[in-house]
Image (cartoon, grey):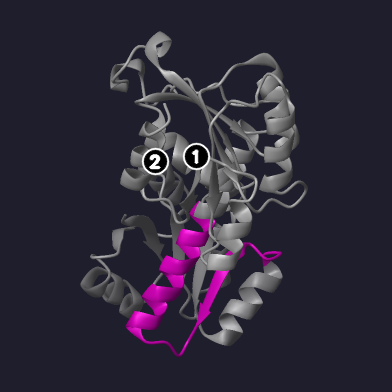
Amino acid sequence: MKYKILLIGKYTALMDMFFAHAQGNFECYSCSTRTEDIFNHLKLFTPDALVYGLNKDPQDTINKVLACKNRLLQLEVPLVIIGSYEECSEFNINSGGAAKLVITRPFTTSSLMEKLENYLYQNHRVKHVQEDIKEIQEGRISSGAPSPSQGAAEESKPAEEKKRILVVDDDPLMLKLIKEHLHEEYEVGTALSGKVAMKFLEKKTVDLILLDYEMPDEKGPEVLQKIHDNENTKDIPVLFLTGVTEKKKIQQALIQKPQGYILKPINKDRLMESIKKFV
């Protein structure tokens, strides 16, 4: 994906660098340092970052940028500053640490682009995790219904015809990924722990369970044992999700006789093929 960045400041060499070399990685826009102009551009296309090139700017120019601090926080748009070590240090001290990423000279074009892209990638990942944690909390297990952005029209089967799969994993990103892979063909429930999974199974029946082998509180084998010990769940097929590739550990994972295992990172085709053997 291309990240959208809004460039401001009188650091013309930096501007030229972005527009000449960054178009493959970033969608670049620029505007003046007038507060109203920055506000309008933020509203117009909500960039992934506001990049301010410091180059011996007068204090009134810096103040105009700082006047946008609260708006940036509201929109969750990080401020990135680029300049000399002295300028960047003074800016961050006077602004109370407003800049989320500081890049100081000297730098090469490639190192600058790499630092900015890595930061934006991590920032997006954190935001997604925060969103997913809100969506997938203990006691608020997803029922597998499509989100409004997916829409009912994307489903290949009516909900009443779908088999139900429960995915148990302590990583919200993994839950989201698997749900994205499966939601068109299956009704997908998710749980962040074995405890939540067992509560889910008290209320709903499922046709298959995808169970993470390594979890912090209760590991997959412990949860599988509870599933096998419960009269109502003992016949549900269970597939381990595991990043373990050592032969000995895989053999240990199979001692409790799950129906199989799926290696991480998850490949959609292998995932669908494995599931179709049991549902």
Q: Nearer the viewer, residue 42 or 127?
A: 127
Quadrant of image for the N terminus: bottom left
Q: Is residue 253 left or right of residue 10?
A: right
Q: Residue at x 57, y 26 (%)?
A: 142
Identify the magenta region.
95-124
Which of marks 2 and 1 precedes in the sequence?
1
Provide the secondary structure element on which disc 2 rests. Answer: helix
Residue 104 on the magenta span? yes
Q: Is residue 54 left or right of residue 13?
A: right
Q: Nearer the viewer, residue 159 or 116?
A: 159
Q: Residue at x 47, y 20 (%)?
A: 145
- Residue 182 in the image, given as x and y percentages of width and height: 40, 32
| Disc 1 residue type (three-letter) | Lys
Q: Which residue is mark 2?
A: 274
Q: Residue at x 45, y 43 (%)?
A: 177
| Disc 2 residue type (three-letter) | Ser
> Can residue 203 be spotted in the picture?
yes
Disc ID at residue 176: 1
- Residue 54 in the image, given as x and y percentages of width and height: 48, 75
Residue 128 on the magenta span? no
